[in-house]
Amino acid sequence: MLRWMRFFLVVTVFGSTAAFAGDCRKTGSVCADATPVKLISGVAVNVADVGGCWEYEDTYGDV
């Protein structure tokens, strides 16, 4: 049993690949949803009331 626990620990610690965030910065932002009016909880809300865009799509680049 102890042997399997050691094996599991080694595989977990050394076998997993860690993903590290590189140095990046936002290079652009584009409106992805500019629907003129949306119903929110039964209330019609204009896109102008929320700043001209419902959802933005950002792009990033390496520094």
Image (spheres, grey):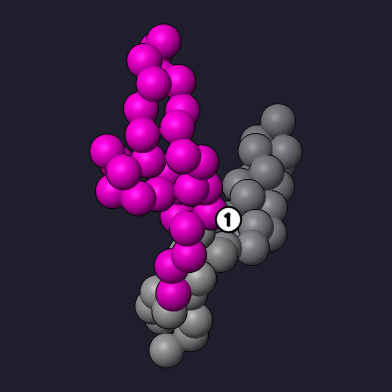
- Please, is residue 45 above or below residue 19 in the view? above
- Amino acid under label 1? Val
Quadrant of image for the N terminus = top right
Quadrant of the image containing the C terminus: bottom left
Is residue 31 visible in the rendered image? The answer is yes
- Which residue is at the front of the view, 44 or 24? 44
Q: Would you identify the image quadrant in which residue 44 lies?
A: top left
The quarter of the displayed image where residue 10 is located: bottom right
Between 59 and 12, the one nearer to me in the picture: 59
**Residue at the spot of label 1:** 13
Q: Residue at x 45, y 20 (%)?
A: 39
Q: Is residue 51 left or right of residue 9?
A: left
Question: Residue 47 at x, y = what percent?
Answer: 37, 40
Instruction: Judge whether residue 45 is colored magenta.
Output: yes
Image point 63% across, 50% down: which residue? 12
Look at the picture and state if 33 lies above or below 29.
Answer: above
Outermost residue to the top: 42
SS assignment at label 1: helix
- Quick one: which residue is furthest to the bottom in this view? 63
Q: To which quarter of the image does residue 29 belong?
A: bottom left
Q: Who's the residue at 28% across and 48% down the image?
A: 51
On the image, the x and y values in percent for residue 11 come to 68, 53
Q: Report the label total.
A: 1
Highlighted range, magenta = 28-56
Which is more toward the observer, 7 or 41?
A: 41
Place of residue 33 in the rendered image (x, y in percent of width and height, measured from the top left) = 52, 47
How dense is the environment of label 1, judged by Cα within 10 Å: few (below 14), some, or many (20 and up)? few
In magenta segment, residue 12: no
Residue at horizontal 36 percent and vertical 15 percent from the top:
43
Instruction: Mark yes or no: residue 22 visible.
Output: no
Q: Is residue 15 left or right of residue 58?
A: right
